[in-house]
Image: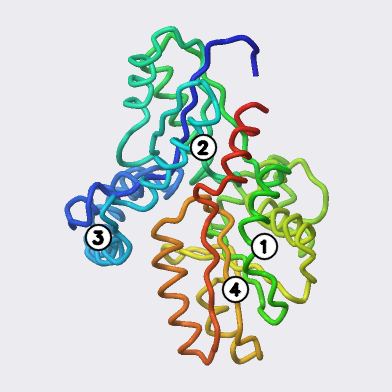
Amino acid sequence: MAENKKRGVILMNLGSPDSTEVKDVRRYLDEFLMDERVIDSHYIIRSVLVKGIITPFRAPKSAEAYRSIWTKDGSPLVHITRQLRDALQQQITEPVLIAMRYGSPDMKSAYDEMLRIFPEVEEVVLLPLYPHYAMSSFETASVHARKVHADEKYPFSISVVRPFYNHPAYIAALAESMRPYVTDTKSHLVFSYHSIPEKHILKGDVTERHCLQSATCCTTPSPAHSYCYRHQCYETTRLVTELLGIPKDKYSVAFQSKLGRAAWLTPATTARMEQMPGEGIKDILVVCPSFVSDCLETLEEIAIREKENFIEAGGEKYEYIPCMNTQQKWVDAVVTLINS
């Protein structure tokens, strides 16, 4: 990162609908699912699939799910991101703004606002709030941010902070957020990461011959790991469990939020919730390290729905560990990341 430049900072998160009304949820889903890095089919096929099949059926259900977590401040994800911005602003002198990949505030609005409040800005440091590299998260966020910057010919440069799945500051903050919950050695800890299609893993394999080719591909050193979401999830798990001193037989990894019929990363979180009680695992903790801010996928899917699945399958104790959100250790980590 260049020194002595007049900098601004933008925190970029996924986004949310403007409200829980079906029309707003449908608009949001259309924008999200029409992204070629989320559903990577030909535009016509994607358009028919999203606008003709997925969104009309999914929007009412998603609206109901959003209503179950919506607050007086609106979307939890957007509100928490604003709170993170405010906490960060208390620790650095550079102006801090937020942008969402989908929904509002959008990237152009954030760039425009940065110029309005800080006309002399020379560099914008963009931090996509995704710890792990994936086409459908970090890649689409960074590519979109660069495209908007180039299309609008902004006078400042941009620098994008890379995925931080193994950065000591992130690992320390994640471990600290989990520490109060993992003192009970009887509980089994489930790391539930957002799943992605297997073909996204294969597309990101720069060697074209490593990812998903063996049972040990994620632990065998390879240049592919810089872009391999699966490897990075397992590496985060390894690092944080070592820091917390959690034995290997007391935790496991699963992948949530599958969409469609294609092969996605497994084991699926839902399947594991149904299986674990039958395996004698009836007391669990669940953490979602691919999210730094609580959102629909953590508050509704994990804290509500998957808890119901686990209890119905015979589980006895289930506790969700909240995201880092605005915890001080995480705010300190963000300072470290934007200055790296």
Distance CA(mark 2)–CA(mark 4): 27 Å
Camera-side residue: 287 or 202? 287
Crowd class of label 1 (few under 14; some 14 to 19; many from 20; radius 10 Å):
few
Distance CA(mark 3)–CA(mark 4): 30 Å
Mark 4 in CB contact with mark 1 (< 8 angstroms): no
Mark 1 in CB contact with mark 2 (< 8 angstroms): no
For marks 1 and 3 on the same chain, the one whose residue lies earlier in the sequence: 3
Indicate the amino acid at tag 1: Arg
Q: Secondary structure at mark 2?
A: strand
Distance CA(mark 1)–CA(mark 2): 25 Å
Total numbered labels: 4
Mark 2 in CB contact with mark 4 (< 8 angstroms): no
Q: Is residue 179 left or right of residue 10?
A: right
Residue beneath the point at 32% across and 26% down: 109
Please name the residue that numbered disc 1 is placed on: 179
Q: Secondary structure at mark 1?
A: helix
Please name the residue that numbered disc 3 is placed on: 59
For marks 1 and 2 on the same chain, the one whose residue lies earlier in the sequence: 2
For marks 3 and 4 on the same chain, the one whose residue lies earlier in the sequence: 3
Task: Give percent across and percent down for residue 53.
Answer: 26, 60
Please name the residue that numbered disc 2 is placed on: 128
Please name the residue that numbered disc 4 is placed on: 285
Residue beneath the point at 59% across and 56% down: 289
Indicate the amino acid at tag 3: Ala
Task: Give percent across and percent down for residue 178.
Answer: 63, 61
Mark 1 in CB contact with mark 3 (< 8 angstroms): no
Task: Give percent across and percent down for residue 244.
Answer: 75, 61
